Image (tube, rainbow, N blue to C red):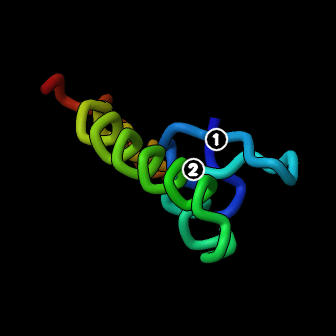
Amino acid sequence: MRCPECGSKRVLVLVHSLRALCGACMYQWCPPDDVDLMRVARGAAAISETIAMDLPPDPPEAAVSSELSEPPEPA
């Protein structure tokens, strides 16, 4: 699942407005006077960064050229 705001594959957090956002977007979106929500957003952003570092990178997009006649070499 990806964050609908930024498209990242970070952990999604369901906030009280019933929107699913990653921790970083939630931190930017949440009202600064809501102390509890800010605490959750900071924690979610920190957890998301940790998990994002552990995720493998996205595979490169496949070439769509019709001129590509040879299969890619194995890594």
Q: State the CA–CA distance, disc 1 to disc 2.
A: 6 Å
Residue at x-position 40% and y-position 43% = 48
State the image coordinates of residue 32 (x, y, percent, origin top left): 61, 76
In the rendered image, the quadrant that contains the C terminus is top left
Q: Is residue 42 above or below residue 29?
A: above
Q: Verify CB contact (< 8 Å) between mark 1 and mark 2.
A: yes
- Residue 55 as seen in the image, left or right of residue 75: right
Above-or-below relation of 7 to 33:
above
| Identity, as a three-letter code, of the amino acid under mark 1 | Val
Report the front residue among 59 and 30.
30
36 and 25: which is toward the camera: 36
Q: Decide which of 6, 34 is in the foreground and name it.
A: 34
Outermost residue on the right side: it is 18
Identified by mark 2, the residue type is Cys
Q: Which residue is mark 2?
A: 22
Q: Is residue 48 left or right of residue 16?
A: left
Left-right relation of 45 to 2 = left
Query: Which residue is labeled 1 in the image?
Result: 13
